[in-house]
Amino acid sequence: MRRFVVSALLLALPGCRSAGRPWPAAEAQSAALDVRRGDVRLAPDVLVRRIAPDVWMHVTLHEYPGPLHYPSNGLLVVTGDSALLVDTAWDDRQTALLLDWAERGLRRPVRRAVATHAHEDRTGGIAALRARGIPMAALARTGEIARAAGRPAPDSVPGLALAPRRDAAGFELFYPGAGHAPDNVVVYLPRERVLFGGCLVKPDTATTLGNVADADVAHWPAAVARVRERYAAARVVVPGHGAVGGLGALAATERLVREKGAPRRPR
């Protein structure tokens, strides 16, 4: 059986990629990770893994020329008789596989989706959602960035930039300020105590910030600190790339950004 290829150690992943920007050569690390018991592999590059009773993490790979494979995480959350998709896969084909599985495997079709920022690993499959009439919501700034790049844009959540928005389906969206991207939001599931940090949060074993082309490195630690303070009850923290962890991932992200993002002193 072909093994599921995942970027280096999956625990120390590089960060998220902007549409159209290749990964730096220094981040060209790859390794193989066997599918775990209980995982469902929908394709060689699409996997779903249960992380809470009603919460599944989806992991999809993007391949570049050479042996480079970059996994990205999102969520599928059961909400009553339907499911919520948090971030699409890298592309429409992968996203369609996730939608099919939610309908046939979970028997909970995806009726809504949210995007945690505008990069390709969060919104690359938005056309697959539109083809099925599934709305996707995000920070207004996310739509602005997508439209400026000539890509399909999600709908905006009114007022999200100013205050957290609690949804009747049982999740909360929070914009803590710029960090990995100017529009990064997080998603919290209070019943399950699961925090999806997206690319704002690094796994606690990460050693690199990854792509910082759109990052606000100076304000990134403060944004993570706001998330840590607001969701101190979280038990599970899911980064945009890499292994699921706990609240330690937030403190580790703050330290990493301060260390790696500090401006170099002139010699």
Image (cartoon, rainbow, N blue to C red):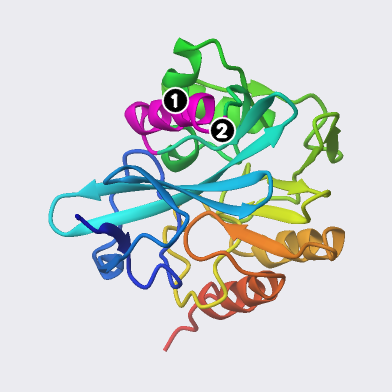
Q: CA distance from mark 1 to mark 2?
A: 9 Å
Q: Is residue 191 left or right of residue 266?
A: right
* Point 45% across, 11% down: residue: 131
Classify 128 as above or below 63.
above
Q: Which residue is mark 1?
A: 100
Classify 130 as above or below 137.
above
Classify 100 as above or below 89.
above
Q: How many numbered discs, if any?
A: 2
Q: Nearer the viewer, residue 52 or 254?
A: 52
* Point 61% across, 76% down: residue: 258
- Label 2 CA crowd tier, 10 Å (few <14, some 14–19, many 20+): some
Q: Nearer the viewer, residue 118 or 84?
A: 84
Q: Is 73 a magenta residue?
A: no
Q: Nearer the viewer, residue 54 or 131?
A: 54
Classify 215 as above or below 77.
below
Q: Tell which circle, 1 or 2, labels the residue nearer the N-terminal end.
A: 1
- Label 1 CA crowd tier, 10 Å (few <14, some 14–19, many 20+): some
Q: Quadrant of residue 110?
A: top right
Q: Is 97 a magenta residue?
A: yes
Q: Which residues are magenta?
A: 90-106
Specify the quadrant that holds the C terminus.
bottom left
Q: Which residue is mark 2?
A: 106
Q: Where is residue 62 drawn, in percent x and y?
A: 30, 46
* Point 73% across, 32% down: residue: 79
* Dominant secondary structure, magenta: helix
Q: Quadrant of residue 248?
A: bottom right
Specify the quadrant that holds the N terminus.
bottom left
* Point 29% across, 61% down: residue: 24
Q: Where is residue 245 drawn, in percent x and y?
A: 61, 69
Q: Amino acid at mark 1?
A: Asp
Q: Amino acid at mark 2?
A: Leu
Q: Is residue 121 left or right of residue 180?
A: left
